[in-house]
Amino acid sequence: MSTKPNSSSSQYQIYTRLQQVFSPSSLVVHDDSHKHHGHKGALENPDKGHFHVVISAISLRNKNLLQQHRMIYQALSPLMHRIHALQITIKKDDSSL
């Protein structure tokens, strides 16, 4: 199961990039920026967002947590100028998305 964002926002770009790199069996990208509205970081960097990625991909299996996170950060490196905070949840299968 994958939930594709509807616009050309940062959320959409993150989703598209992760789809291209990992071909995940499931992927959801939540834009949680609204939860941080008014925080100092949000005020100083209004063009950067808070995102939560929930992903299940074969290429992430059999890797430790640090390796998985490094792979995702590497994939998103061209978009890091748009990301203030990134929460990553890696699922072993797509049954709990």
Image (cartoon, rainbow, N blue to C red):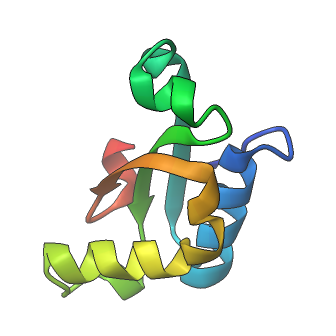
Q: Please state if 93 lies on the left or on the right of 85 as rendered.
A: left
Q: Quadrant of residue 72?
A: bottom left
User: Residue at horizontal 18%, vertical 77%?
Assistant: 66
Res 59 quadrant in image:
bottom left
Q: Position of residue 84 (x, y in %)?
A: 47, 46
Q: Is residue 81 above or below residue 65?
A: above
Q: What's the residue at 47%, 81% (across, down)?
A: 74
Screen quadrant of the C terminus: top left
Left or right placement of residue 66 versus residue 21 in this view: left
> Which residue is more in the foreground, 62 or 7?
7
The residue positioned farthest toward the left in the image shown: 64
Q: Is residue 4 visible?
A: no
Toward the viewer: 46 or 63? 46
Up-down: is 38 above or below 15?
above
User: Could you tell me which residue is drawn at 64 percent across and 31 percent down?
Assistant: 46
In percent of width and height, residue 10 lies at 70, 48
x and y, in percent, of residue 7 in the image: 85, 40
* In the image: residue 26, left or right of residue 59: right
Which one is in front, 22 or 32? 32
| Above or below, 45 relative to 19 | above
Q: Examine the image and state in which quarter residue 73 appears.
A: bottom left
Does residue 50 appear in this view? yes
Number of marks present in the image shown: 0
Residue 76: x and y, percent?
55, 71
